[in-house]
Image (cartoon, rainbow, N blue to C red):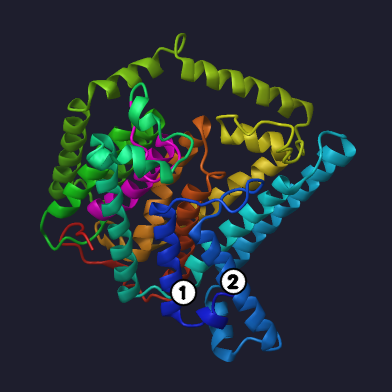
Amino acid sequence: MFWNNGITRRNDTRLFILAMAMLSAMILPSFPIHPSLPNIRLDELLLFGVFGLNILLFAAKGFRFSPEEKEQLLKRKQEHKGILLIFVLLVFSYAISNIYGVIIKGAGYYGLRDVMELVTFCKYYLAVTLALSIDLRTEEFDFLGKAFLGGLAFLIFFGWGQHFNVLNMNTWLSPYFDQQHWQLLLVGNPARVQGTFDNPNFFGIFTVMTLAYLTVRYYFGEDHGKFPVLLFILIGFVIKLEFLTISRTALVGIGLLFLILSIWAFSYHRHNKKVLVKIAALFVLTAVLFLTASADFFYRLQEGLDFSNSTSFQGHLERWGKAIGSIWDSPVFGWGTQKYVMTTLVDNEYALYARRYGFFGLAIYLSFFLLPFILGIRNLLAKIAVFGRGLAFSQPMQFMAAYAAVLPSIFVFNIMAGIFYNLQLMTFFAICMGLAYNSFAEQRGINDTSLRPLSSLSKVV
């Protein structure tokens, strides 16, 4: 892990780079560099550029860490070993499957587009480890929280601007963010808001990720005995933003997220009256926003439930069937990436990954998501066992809880789409994953201030 040396040896610099990468993943479009190459993003330039400079500077020092840098590495050693193991296994699975598919099975061929898969793995590794490398104290949490809220405010205004086509922005501004699907904002049936993402469904699941953290703060943070009105209003805006995307899978994700967190809060706070008020208020808010949604929203919901006539559902079934047939022809190691001869349009990330890397690769893919989930649950249960229930979560514990709560919704989303191969969305989620890993390390160094006396629950940063 080369983040704690070179130009990012200072914690403030690493924090700034992380905030810029996060904001880039939230609000900036990709841009083309060559017709034969995929578009590139600012967060990719930041991550690879800074990391490359750090390696050069490390080489100039004779490949030696200073005593201070060694101490920083030791603090994160346990988490980094787990992350490194997962990514080594991802690369190993990639290599085995491509050798097996192209050379042994003699299917297709291997080219530059297939190499870019490795670049994708490296990018996620850099995002996760950058978030892990930062010493997150109160000031760092505040800075990162304010950066995130600034990006979220932009997305809320931008999303509503697309919905109402303010200043005719959908003809001159929205196309910069998505050259392929921006027409959905004007002539879609129905028209759907997609924010800065290249698909309304990806914007929809981004709102679910956002709601995970906001709702954890709502239920488990400190509020000093007061109802968190501003946080409650912000949650309402984000829910409404998802409704504007008319993403049915993200809607299911919100329902699952709220169910998990509400049951958890009800149990954790020992059926406290204040938490009952919060659960009821969140239910009423969601119900009001749902019942006052547009006719287009309900049309799309109804169309999706009519499985026999839904063109979307029938299309999913057709693509799943083709992918499953390929999987059973090579179930263990798959066929390799095969980007030149096999379609990437599968509409099920598990099927796509299993077709490429077999069930061996799929197991590693699932471990990539599940490892921080398991560690987070284990850490949370350990702290609760020591201090009991009913106390407010610290910031590190909130990151753990948010990741654990949102992962089931992500897994549901991956049935109909998938986040791993969306470089914008997965970069943001990789940062969330890295912050969860960071929280495990922070908890080992915190002397039991991680659970604090609760007046009740949380307030906005």
- Which x, y percent locates residue 308? 47, 9
Taken as a whole, is the magenta stretch helix, strand or loop? helix
Residue receiving disc 2 = 51
Find out whether residue 193 is within the magenta segment: yes
Q: Quadrant of the C terminus?
A: bottom left
Task: Locate residue 386 relative to residue 435 in the image: left or right.
Answer: left
Find out whether residue 75 is within the magenta segment: no
**Region in magenta:** 191-219
Q: Decide: few, some or many residues near mark 1? Use Cα within 10 Å; few <14, some 14-19, many ≥20.
A: many
Secondary structure state at the residue bearing disc 1:
helix
Q: Is residue 384 visible?
A: no
Q: Residue at x 78, y 26 (%)?
A: 329
Q: Point out the tag, 2 or 1, that comes first from the N-terminus.
A: 1
Task: Locate residue 20 relative to residue 123 in the image: left or right.
Answer: left
Secondary structure state at the residue bearing disc 2:
helix
Q: Point out which mark residue 14 bears.
A: 1
Give the residue type that dot 1 points to: Arg
Give the residue type that dot 2 points to: Phe
Between the C-alphas of marks 2 and 1, the distance is 11 Å
Up-down relation of residue 31 to residue 340 (above or below): below
